[in-house]
Amino acid sequence: MPTNDISEERVKMLADLVGIPIDDVDLPEVANRFASLIRELDRLQELDLEGIEPVSIFPDADGDTQ
């Protein structure tokens, strides 16, 4: 999602869809932080990860990380 597509209205719509209440007074700050997060996540797409195997860091039901 390009950060220029992240408007306050879009953030409000997404928050409503997932059931997160956001007061109108907080909406500009939430939208700004969300856009910042998306920019940082977009930077990850620039990394060359070819040949790097994924690593499981979350334990399974037995507590093992495989």
Image (cartoon, helix red, strand yellow):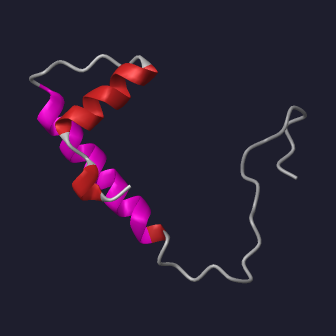
Quadrant (top left/top right/bottom left/bottom right) for the N terminus: bottom left
Choose top left, top right, bottom left or bottom right for residue 40.
Answer: bottom left
User: Eyeballing the image, is 35 above or below 63?
Assistant: below
Q: Is residue 19 magenta?
A: no
Q: Is residue 32 above or below residue 36?
A: above
In front of the other: 38 or 6 = 6
Is residue 32 one of those drawn in magenta? yes
Kindly report the secondary structure that dominates the magenta region of the rendered protein: helix
Q: Left or right: 23 with respect to 12? A: left
Give the side of residue 18 with respect to residue 61, left or right: left
In the picture, residue 3 is in which quadrant?
bottom left
Question: What residue do we see at 9% from left, 23% from top?
Answer: 25
Q: In this view, does 59 lie to the left or right of 9?
A: right
Residue 2 placed where, x, y %? Answer: 32, 59
Residue 65 or residue 40, whichever sits in front: 40
Q: Residue at x 73, y 45 (%)?
A: 58
| Residue stretch rendered in magenta on the structure | 26-43
Please provide percent x and percent y for residue 53: 77, 72
Considering only vertical position in the picture, is 50 above or below 65?
below
How far from the left and from the top, in percent, is residue 38? 36, 54
**Residue 39 percent coordinates (x, y):** 32, 61
The correct choice, above or below, for 15 with respect to 33 in the image is above
